[in-house]
Amino acid sequence: MKDSEIIERIKRGDESALDFLYKKNYRMMVKMIMKNNGSEEEAKDVYQEALIVVWQKVLSEDFTLTSKLSTFLYSICQNLWRKELERKSRLSNEESDESEIFDIDKKERIEIINQCISDLGETCRKILTYYYFDKLSMNDIAEKLGFANADTAKTKKYKCKKELDKKIKSLYTASDFLD
């Protein structure tokens, strides 16, 4: 089918012309989008949108085809895909901005907790550091600090954790930690 025949059929509302156009150019359009960081699913969506645009343009009264129909369709696909990439880029930039803010908040919270831990006694500081930061077992902590057994270390850790919680709550409100 020639371009002029496809255009005439579209103007008459013949959807088989659109089906022909779809099948004829499908691989070329999908390859173009996939080469430009798109998935096949995204390519199908963009290609279908492009065909709708072609359909609407052909039906408009002032439509004149100045290139091959496949070239016209290709440029529409390129423009739609470029817009989609820009939209994705904006979304990922917004997400990275949010994660940077979250990282800053997290660092501040860790600094607050570290400051409060350093204000505790040496034994509590060591127990909490070994347990929460170094991920040592209660047996290892008991051995390092010379406690009788793991249960003694666990009891001491519980008391130190309560003391840390009390210190943090006396200096900061819950809203300092929650957004």
Image: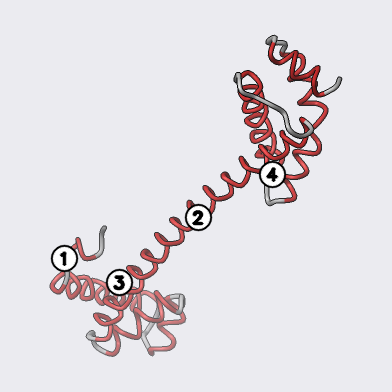
Residue position marked by numbered label 2 in the rendering: 92
The reply to whether discs 3 and 2 touch (Cβ–Cβ < 8 Å) is no
Label 1 to label 2, Cα distance in Å?
33 Å
Residue position marked by numbered label 1 in the rendering: 173
Residue 137 on image: x %, y %: 46, 75
Residue 47 on image: x %, y %: 68, 33
Is 151 positioned to the left or the right of 140 in the image? left
Q: Secondary structure at mark 4?
A: loop
At label 1, the amino acid type is Thr
Q: Residue at x 65, y 24 (%)?
A: 63
Q: Secondary structure at mark 2?
A: helix
Residue position marked by numbered label 4 in the rendering: 39
Label 3 to label 2, Cα distance in Å?
25 Å
Is 111 positioned to the left or the right of 90 in the image? left
Residue position marked by numbered label 3 in the rendering: 109
How busy is the neighbourhood of tag 2: few (under 14 within 10 Å), some, or many (20 plus)? few
Label 3 to label 1, Cα distance in Å?
12 Å
**Which of these two is toward me, 43 or 134?**
43
